[in-house]
Amino acid sequence: MKIIVYWFRGDLRLTDNPGFLSSCADAEYVLPIYIHDSKDLLDSEWGFPRRGSYRQQFLSESLCDLKLQLQQRGSDLVELSGSPDVVIPNLIKTIGSAEVYCQRIQAPEEQGDIHQLTKQGVFVKEFWQSTMVDPKDLPFDIEDMPDVFTAFRQKIENAKIRFAKPEAIPTSIPPLPMDLRKILQKQDTPNSQNYSHAHESTEAPLLIFKGGERAARLHVEQYFERRLPDTYKETRNQLLGMDYSSKFSPWLAQGCISARSIAQDLDHYEKQYGANDGTYWLWFELLWRDYFAFLPFKYGKKLFHRRGLSDKPVGKINLSQLNQWINGQTKEPFVNAAMKELSSTGFMSNRMRQIVASYWIYDMGGDWRAGAAWFESQLIDYDVYSNQGNWLYIAGRGTDPRGGRPFNVAKQMHDHDPDRVYQNHWL
């Protein structure tokens, strides 16, 4: 009797989930789980929660949707809380012998969890499934990938690589190994509901996005049906509204939908309506996302060091200044408006993310890591690869050949908010 524990971690979907599909094919019994990691309950070293209320609410909705989909197919989702290197061995003791399948996340904390599990004798099989392009299809060894994005993109395009074909949803899911109540009763971890609301106010935040695979699919479908890809390049730097950019990122970040599925939809769209600058630029941005996800294979923990890949000194932390930036109380109304939007919605346009990051690093002389940690706490679409990659990029501590990307706030305001519509909306 083969039992597989499928550990959902950043892949909260059933469609195009090779790891879950493989667990259904390989096992007689499958137990789907999600672990509310106790590390996420901690505060950052700068005193704010690692996961704020907006991120937690979107995650909770995504888990509810996944649980319902599993239940409709005769399975379920068991939510547990604690440290994975404690929770999973205890779970395996409860159900007997079992293997663990999960998505691979190439970041230090997540890889540390896998290392600790294997040290305890737990068999873990990881599946890379979060990028549009499969690493096996790259025209170079991933450890030797080009540092500069332009060279990376050109090699991909010259090899005529677009995206990996998505996998279908499992036709059937093997039964659960035993009564769920018995599993939960034998766990030493607290109830997941305690975790879910640990950093929330008494009222759940009002989100502009709804979590879950079905909400993701509805959003993507309406985006293509309304032919919004055609204008993507022209509108992507706008600051207000739902339609100026794709808004795929919240669902991509939680794995409610895969980049490969979106790329396939884009391919179908181009075959029906023709390719144009907008459709190319949408693919281009998905490739940027892949680029940041692949960099940790080459540089590993260096990307998470205080100085990144650079020897430049790091800005000092002035907590008073950090709170001014966080609360939108700087000398720049344009920056303040963006920080108010972030704290009010859990979202901010890519253009404004670059501007406020630059202002914190270059105008306020702040530590880039504190800014990255605040984004991790607040952004509904927080993704470890893109967040780290973009902050390193702006700070000149990654692979950017320019050595940093300082933005002129006055010029950016003139270019993107000349009539102060955005500022008036948020201030």
Image (cartoon, rainbow, N blue to C red):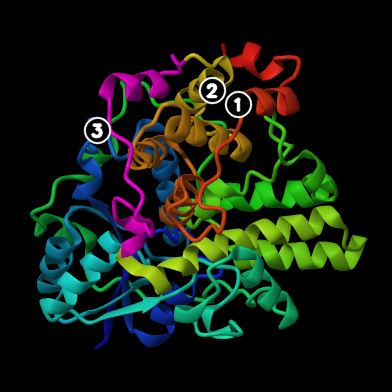
Q: Residues within 10 Å of mark 3 (few under 14, many from 20)?
A: some
Q: Residue at x 66, y 48 (%)?
A: 218
Residue bearing mark 1? 409
Mark toward the start of the polypeptide (1 vs 3): 3
Q: Which label belongs to residue 335?
A: 2
Q: Please state which of residues 10 and 148 is positioned toward the viewer in this rendering.
A: 148
Place residue 111 in its image quadrant.
bottom left
Q: Main secondary structure of the magenta part?
A: loop
Is residue 258 shown to the viewer in this render?
no
Label 3 SS: loop
Q: Position of residue 82 (x, y in %)?
A: 16, 52
Q: Position of residue 256 (x, y in %)?
A: 51, 55
Label 1 SS: helix
Label 2 SS: helix
Residue bearing mark 3? 46
Q: What amino acid type is highlighted by mark number 2? A: Val
Q: Residue at x 55, y 65 (%)?
A: 291
Q: Residues within 10 Å of mark 2 (few under 14, many from 20)?
A: many
| Tag 2 near tag 1, CB within 8 Å | yes
Q: Which label belongs to residue 97?
A: none
Place residue 265 in its image quadrant.
bottom right
Q: Give the vertical position of 333 relative to 406 (above or below).
A: above
Is residue 402 shown to the viewer in this render?
yes
Q: What amino acid type is highlighted by mark number 3? A: Trp
Q: Which residues are magenta?
A: 302-330
The Cα atoms of the two marked residues, 1 and 3, are separated by 26 Å
